[in-house]
Image (tube, helix red, strand yellow):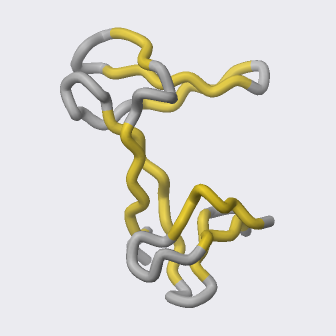
Amino acid sequence: MNFADNECPDCKIALYWDGQYFCKQCTKHFVKIGYCPDCQAEMEKLQACGAANYFCNSCNELKSKSRARFEFQPIKA
């Protein structure tokens, strides 16, 4: 499965999903991390009933996915 908006931070090609985000060119797996748009702290992803929400423990409130900043970081083996 191809995710066009999810590109490799190193080579900029689209990441694939094999149970994790994977770059076929770099042969690396990545994790997608969301950061709070207000305080820049890492947010917790909450999933229920098919919907994903993001919670900032620093601000102690739910944050909109559309405002969040996302980064892909390599998974260390």
- The x, y position of residue 1, in whole percent, is 80, 65
Q: Residue furthest top?
A: 61
Query: Which residue is located at x 77 percent, y 26 percent?
Result: 50
Query: Which residue is located at x 41 percent, y 27 percent?
Result: 67
- The x, y position of residue 47, in whole percent, is 64, 26
Up-down: is 35 above or below 24?
above
Q: Residue furthest left?
A: 39
Total numbered circles:
0
Between residue 4 and residue 18, name the one nearer to us: 4
Up-down: is 3 above or below 43?
below
Query: Which residue is located at x 31 percent, y 29 percent?
Result: 36
Which quadrant would the C terminus be assigned to in this image? bottom left
Up-down: is 5 above or below 23?
above
Query: Which residue is located at x 48 percent, y 52 percent?
Result: 32
- The x, y position of residue 72, in whole percent, is 42, 60
In the image, 34: left or right of 27?
Answer: left
In the image, 67: left or right of 13?
Answer: left
